[in-house]
Amino acid sequence: MENRFFVSSSPHITDRESIPRIMYSVTLSLVPAAIGAIYFFGQRALWVMLIGMVSAVLTEAVLEKLLKKPITISDGSAMLTGLLLAFNVPAEVPWWIPMIGSVFAISIGKVVFGGLGYNPMNPALLGRAFLLASWPTHMTIFKTIPRGGTLSGIDIITSATPLNVFRQAKTAIATNANLITDTNDIVPPGEVLSQLSDAYSNLFFGRIGGCIGETSVLLLLLGALFLIYKRYISLKIPLSYIGTVALLSWIFGGTEGLFSGDPIFHVLAGGLILGAFYMATDMVTSPVTYKGRIIFGVGCGVITVLIRLVGGYPEGVSYSILLMNLTVPLIDRYSKPKVFGEVKKK
Amino acid sequence: MFRRLSFKGGVHPPGKKELAEKKAIEKMPVPPYIIIPVQQHIGAPGTPCVEPGQRVLTGQKVCDAKGFVSVPAHSSVTGVVKSIEPRPHPLGGNILSIIIETEGEEELVPEIKLNENYFDLSVSEMKKKILEAGIAGMGGAAFPTHVKLSPPPPKKIDILILNGAECEPYLTSDARVMIEHGDEVLAGMRILMKILDCKQGYIAIEKNKPEAIKTLRKLIKQQGDSISVIGLHVKYPQGAEKQLIKAVTDRKVPAGGLPMDVGCLVQNTGTARAIYEAVAMNKPLYERVVSVTGKGIREPANVLTRIGTPMANLFEFCGGLTDDAAKVINGGPMMGIAQADLEAPITKGTSGIVVLNRKDASMPESKPCIRCARCVDSCPMNLMPNILAQLVEHQKYEEAAENNILDCIECGCCSYVCPSKIRHVHLFKYGKLKVNKMRKEAA
């Protein structure tokens, strides 16, 4: 009789949250954007996502089996990594691109560090960075025209993504050159820029070219709302990130001096929404303190704008997050909250 | 203008008060024997002052206080001292205890009688009666009350707060005492305010106890008191002393400091009632109201029981345990202590016994931390439980001390919200022990 009671330290109850619950919820929140990807880019997008997810899960299972560790694929995090990786590649990549990306993301991005919770960088973004460095042509050439739109979101230049067009136009202005449209018409770059600014609705709904999961702001925000409601992401990172990008691109992004940029375009274009709400908020690789999350978001924003406006790539979201991931231990250390009733040291 | 009566952090566990909140206090018959541990309070253990074989009356002192931070203990039955030996204690381990077998008709010590003019007693007489009655905080920690009432000279208490927050899930005893004995709670409060010479008095109650709030407000209106009842935002650990003071007065107790450093004193509502009984009736603290609740109990109830009653007898009075009773907790489920032996007695600080069934008691296995920061967000002391847990796990106690592990109040919010089910509090209790030991050795 006496020994039939459990004895343990307090507390004796816990809430129902668990790692699988969080991971599957985040995956669920990406479903609208995934359906959008299939709608805009066709069946190929579905295959890319399936290959990404299956390879990620298989990689984790095989590696853990080889390392004689408990198999953790049921926690849903490998599947989520695979899906996020697939979101970050164009629709027309060969089938082995998402596969290699997922294998790299899970093996080098996660398992070598000890598995979930120990990885210093976002595995999906690391996979993407690896792909981008190894097969840049596959990763940067966008050919599938989204249903109901054009790659750039505008009519005169359709062969590039909005951020690419933006970059070309800026370079053209700097060198006093003109842009050549698809029909071989010569247009002044200023006109192209103003057309981009008129294309907000294409950007918002996702009728533009890009990686399969990053284009539709609307569908991504829909999922993000669910995550915020469930308190799986805190608004501090996305808001400080997006706010910084908006502010800096407004100040420095224009062609007619300071404060002539188009912040709305910069927020809606490229992978910022996907990055800010789903990648930068990755729990394992973002700061745990209040202040830290804001510092992290601002840092991501600064680097993103730097890359977009000055750097060598049209888009800087993934690199900015990866770089900031590495600063997280430092940020956490220097942004410790003040203990309740802390007495000032004399 | 309207400050939200709350604090930063905290969690919202399901209240589970419905099991017992409507159950009126029932008086339990005297058990066949009682166990009085010499230590039921924080401070020095007392010294037994009776011999085996000696006959004792209900309310008779059986254990002397030893030093200032200590309280005496009294027999809660009329009977014969059977033995004085170590017995299981609800806070763990075996502690020297006085075992008394009940015998014959109950007979109270003759001093216990109502003094109508008790309020005219001098402050020092009142304090003496409180000490003599063996009163220690009845909310759980059981700190000797007379010590709290004697702040060292430069400190002045100007705000008295009665803690009726009862923020632990399941527990309902404080609420029942306020509803059924509100007048005595208020009388005790007036005694406290006279002793402290303090003008501001608040009774702080979480808003999920509207009946208690209503009852006390009505009594205060009838009796024309200047005391106010404050309805607090419902959030755990609203009843933790520092968080309560912050919510009620917006004053912040300094880290490592005491409520008196900001001119506040907090007493549990049940303690206030015991103070009234001690001062007005000379009644020592030998019985108290205990919630016996949880899905593992057949008939959850609020029971007026003798201190020293073995838990097993209390369960019998409440219809017994269910077949799937799996965990017995002395106190609430967030901070209470799991019991291995049902022979352990009810003590002065036992506000409730919660028995969880198999389903509620199941504890999932711990997984690696995913740095979700839910613990950091929920910590009412602004600590970083994720970091502290790692430091203790790696035996880096000095660093844990630098990260303020000693400020942890062990409220359990971090473990409660952890999706990886990491047992932070378990680690912190161990870490604090180690740090304190190291400090002692260094000194």
Image: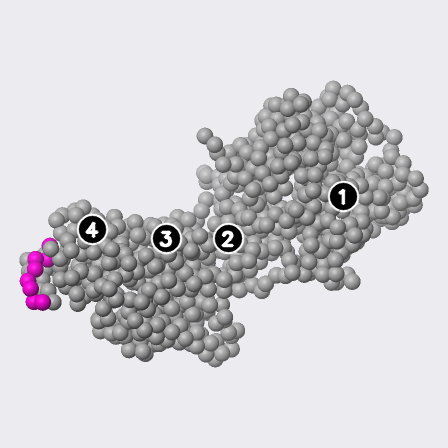
Q: Nearer the viewer, residue A163 or A42?
A: A42
Disc 4 vs disc 2: which is toward the camera?
4
| Occupied quadrant, residue B195 | top right
Q: Amino acid at mark 1?
A: Val
Label 3 with label 4: CB-CB less than 8 Å? no
Q: Position of residue B427 (x, y in %)?
A: 58, 56
Question: Tag 1, which secondary structure?
Answer: strand
Identify the residue position indicated by label 4 in the image. Answer: A262
Identify the residue position indicated by label 3 in the image. Answer: A237
Q: Which residues are magenta?
A: A183-190
x 76%, y 28%: residue? B279
Label 4 with label 2: CB-CB less than 8 Å? no
Q: Amino acid at mark 4?
A: Asp
Dot 3: few (<14), some (14–19), or many (≥20) neighbours within 10 Å?
A: many
Can residue A104 be seen in the rendering of this structure? no
**Magenta stretch encompasses residue B309:** no
x 43%, y 70%: residue? A78
Q: Where B348 falls versus A115 (above or below)?
A: above
Can residue A196 be seen in the rendering of this structure? yes
Q: Is residue A73 left or right of residue B361?
A: left
